[in-house]
Image: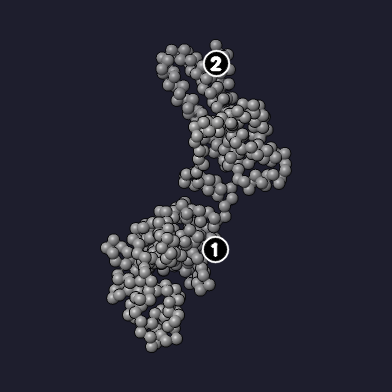
Amino acid sequence: MEVDSTFRVILFFVLIGFSAFFSGSESAYFSLSRELIDRLRERGTSGAMRVVRLLDRPRQLLVTILFGNTIVNVAAASVATLLTADLGHALHLPHSVAILIEVIVVTLILLIFSELTPKVIAVKNSYQFAEKVSIPLTFFYYLFLPITVVLDKFPALVSGLMATRVKRHFLSKDELRTLIEVSEEHGALEEEEKEMIHSIFEFSKTTVREIMVPRIDMVCVERWAPLEELIQIIKEKGHTRIPVYEQKIDNIVGIIHAKELLPFINHAKKKEADLGKLARRALFVPDTKRIDELLNELQREKQHMAIVVDEYGGTAGLITLEDVIEEIVGEIQDEYDQENPLFVKLSENKYLVNAKIDLDELNEELGMKLPVDKNYESLGGLIYEQIGAVPHRKQMVKYGSYKFIVEKVQKNRIVEVIVIKENDNEKGEEES
């Protein structure tokens, strides 16, 4: 009896090892990118070619892995039942208690050692894992081939009999996020690509209020203003679309396009005009609208600008198609935009810094020791995290031995920050 029990324990853990082998193989092989597979094919080494040959028939490979995993898991459960019977007999346990112990212990062992652990290891080291298991996996591939060929045809046969169409499996957001994180760890994504993908995930969560040009920063013109004044505004500000209001900014009557003024340029001083008649219909949107919905509306209405209204119907600001697109691709610079340098030294230990600068770059360039957190990567993100609200100009934040003074805010975003590094003497004076 004792010899049988020892043999069963060894057999149980051998089966668990095979289960881990099949689970890890599935994760490793099916997380290899198409680009990596092509590179392995070009490399042509024996290990690389074994991996490529197995992946040439991905569905057959998957059936092999699943079939093997099912066999060893069923066998492991059967051996565990025998071990439980031995344990229950030796300890005089009731049959129901022994079964409960078996279910709990076997489930935990299978979950931890046969699923989670091997899959995590395999995904993080996908090619190395795939190459190491390629020889035994090839053996099982051909060993199970007569059975897996039949099993491979069975789903198609059943779906044909039921007259149902096989639907494509679309990855969920969580699955996509996991895939992107793995790609980042393996260096498959450039920094710009990573930022753009994360921006797409956040796109549907962002509201118009968060990215609009606020009312105070809007460039508008009164309906009965002289044409000369409007032309001068367009020249100075460089905007091609200007909202037109009557009496007060809460009463927007339309949006005038710069090209509508071309016929009047030579006679602007003499020409009297109702700008409301020259203006095109304005699109009004609530400040709570999500920007993914706004993008669809701008496309449907063939508009490049919308007037944002608050809950009381007053003008809260404006938003353009460019503002929305920049949420995905980042700041768009045209030939008239002047890009500010990331930082300018104002005096000893005092700098004017662009808020979008990466914290790692700031630390490297200025010899600072600012921490990078999962919630933010830029200086602006760090300050937002400390304030916890939309900042205002000249708002100061202290962080360790540094002072941050918000110098410029645009569209509810921090644009420029004055960074002051306090030396030991200044800190001592403050403390005293």
Q: Earlier in the sequence, mark 2 or mark 1?
A: 2
Residue at (35, 74) in percent of width and height: 244
Question: Which residue occupies the foreground of this view, 122 or 360?
Answer: 122
Provide the residue designation for mark 2.
5
Asked whether the beta carbons under mark 2 and mark 1 sit within 8 Å of each other, the answer is no
Quadrant location of residue 211? bottom left
Q: Nearest the camera: 134 or 248?
A: 248
Residue 20, located in which quarter of the rendered image? top right
- Percent x, y for residue 379? 46, 60
Q: Residue at x 53, y 35 (%)?
A: 117
Quadrant containing the N terminus in the rendered view: top right
Q: Residue 69 in the image: x percent, y percent?
A: 56, 29
- Indicate whether 289 appears above or below 130: below
Q: Quadrant of the C terminus?
A: bottom left
Viewer can see residue 178: yes
- Give the quadrant of residue 214: bottom left
Element class at badge 2: helix
Residue drawn at x 44%, y 83% is 265
Colour scheme in use: one colour
Residue 366: give x, y in percent of width and height.
Answer: 52, 64
Q: Residue at x 46, y 55 (%)?
A: 376
Mark 2: few, some, or many residues within 10 Å (few <14, many ≥20)?
some
Asked if 152 appears above or below 194 in the picture, the reply is above
Q: Amino acid at mark 1?
A: Glu
Q: Is residue 403 visible?
A: no
The number of numbered discs placed on residues in the rendered structure image is 2
Which residue matches tag 1?
365
Residue 374 drawn above or below residue 156: below
